[in-house]
Image (cartoon, coloured by chain):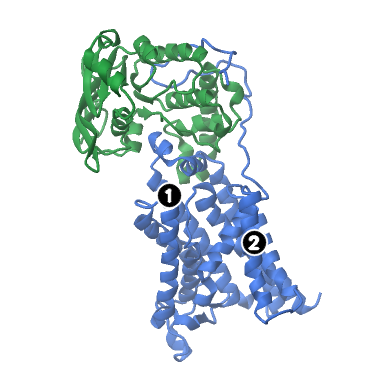
Chain colours: A green, B blue
Amino acid sequence: MSAGPHLVAADAPLLSVRGISRTFGGVHAVADVSFSAPVGQITGLIGPNGAGKSTTLGIVAGAITPTTGTIVFAGRDVTKLPSYRRARLGMIRTFQMRGEFDRLTVLENLLVAAPGQLGENVRNIYSVRRTWRRQQRELIEQARELLDQFGILSHENVYAAELSGGQRRLMEFARALMAQPRLLLLDEPMAGVSPTLRGRLGEHLLEVADSGIAIVLVEHELQFVEHVCGHVLVLAQGTVIGEGKMSALREQAAVLDAYLTG
Amino acid sequence: MSGAWQFYVATLIIYAFVYIIAAAGLNLQFGLTGVYNFAFIIFQAAGAYTTAVFSLGSPGAFSGFQTYILGLHLPFPVPLLASAVVAGVLGVGLGALTVRRLRADYLAIVMLVISLIATGVVTDYQGLFNGAAGLALIPQPFSSLTSSSIVYDWLYAVAAGVICALVLLAVRMMNESPLGRSLRAVRENENAAAALGKNVTALRLLVFGLGGAIAGISGSLLASFTQAWSPSSWLYTETFVLFTALIVGGTGSNLGPVVGAVLVPVVLAEGSRYLPQFGPPTLVPSLEWITIGVVLLAFLWFWPRGIVPEPRRVFPPASSSGPHSPPRARGLSVKNPQRDRGPSR
């Protein structure tokens, strides 16, 4: 693998997943799944429980090693990279459950995500104290601005464990943006979010995508998926059984069967 | 104050500083990063033995009274610094063997076993550090400064206090830095930390090394003061005394290790000496361990965050009211439709 920036052709997808599979003790959790995620588009992964959506997202994020297949991000094969190195390239994920740092405040949760912090180096802590503290002040303001945008600025000094389920989702989304993502991998971002906030969060997602970020999201709320996702993959029993626009997928018998029969 | 009392008080103070230093090192590993290092005491032992073999000189000078490796005779502070380096390298080495594959309770079990193996190896291999008898006559640094042992003890207490203050300051600066925040993030949720670009294994190795080095310094100070060190000085139970001290004082806080180290190994353990003798001869000494165990359980049950809990980090509001720079997410320009409404609970 070569060092330095990896440029993507204008029409090439930022993320390209080719034939990934994963077995757990003989059970095919994911089998030969392929898809792409272009810049500026929200790609949805839907399917009944146990379809392999979260496993697919985990494989793309580097948390789960695929049995076969390749993952190319920004022209670079990242299949063998650990999750922290993928994150440093701009592949940032959120979690279906327990993605917070419970005993860190909301503001600290966001600060952890900021890349390139001088104060994360042992030598810098003691030698360039003023410099990293100045950088931290700037990051604090950026984090506050994001919290303000998501309406949880008043909770900046609250421990993440003390937030409601919906607030945690908002914080995790804000934290993902703080990480300067190029690709966002969102695992059920609407879970626990109140109906009044869902529409707002959807608008946020569309604006983030418009700003030049590719988004892949796993979601059960099909109306929401139809509203925000330009391209949707339907998974059932680890395989892709349909893809395209949500409106077209609603007419496909295989998709309907998968949802009706689980 | 009589000479005996002065010696007693100075000794207690020196022990307190040694325990505070060790607890600060353990706080870095367990309190900040959530690493269950039940072999922590072997890093203190590594520091003590290193100081011994870096300052005792050739074993031939003792006419076969004690045998050990290396046998250097180097001036202070070389043995102290060497102790930190050796214990730190040992920490990274053991960490590299364990933290990549083991987590939480499994890591704790393996580290406990390593502690037992280390004690067994040092006890059985006489040529290493004189076996079960241990090493004696370890030189005290700058002992020629004064002929009065009481004055020397007080000077040693001051020096230990200065070193303790420097260690606490260094740990505090790390705790309050972005690195400390990343360590706490690893403690809280290692998967989420990795998903945000934190190299969890490297961070754990770092605290294994730094915590080990700090433990090595505490061992060096103790061995130089007591002038003797043997396997009975670093049984695995000593690790649990330090864990108890940290849990009682408060894990993750800067002041917790200080409070816990003074209360548990010094006040609590030393206080049992003043109990009147009753029952079988071994009852009162055993009460020391029973008391420590009961105190540990009581704090885990009723006050798990300790006497000085980890503080909530609150950052002051921006000093200027000027416009903020926009978030640095590439090209991000997110408006806020729900500003001032807040999420519904």
Q: Residue furthest right?
A: B1
Q: Which mark is residue B294?
A: 2
Q: Residue at x 48, y 18 (%)?
A: B326
Q: Residue at x 39, y 17 (%)?
A: A221
Instruction: Give how far apart the Cα atoms at labels 1 and 2 are.
Output: 30 Å
| Front of the two marks 1 and 2 | 2
* Residue A52 in view of the camera: yes
Across and down, in percent, residue B235 comes to 51, 71
Q: In this rendering, would B185 be left or right of A225?
A: right
Q: Are marks 1 and 2 in contact (CB under 8 Å)?
A: no
Front one among A199 and B210: A199
Q: Residue at x 64, y 46 (%)?
A: B309
Q: Residue at x 52, y 45 (%)?
A: A126
Mark 2 residue element:
helix
Q: Amino acid at mark 1?
A: Arg
In the image, residue B245 sits, relative to residue A100, either above or below, namely below
Circle 2 packing at 10 Å, graded few (<14), some (14-19), many (20+), is: few
Q: Chain of mark 2?
A: B
Across and down, in percent, residue A218 comes to 35, 23
Across and down, in percent, residue A254 comes to 22, 17
Return the residue at label 1.
B204
Q: In this rendering, would B110 be left or right of B283?
A: left
Mark 1 residue element:
helix
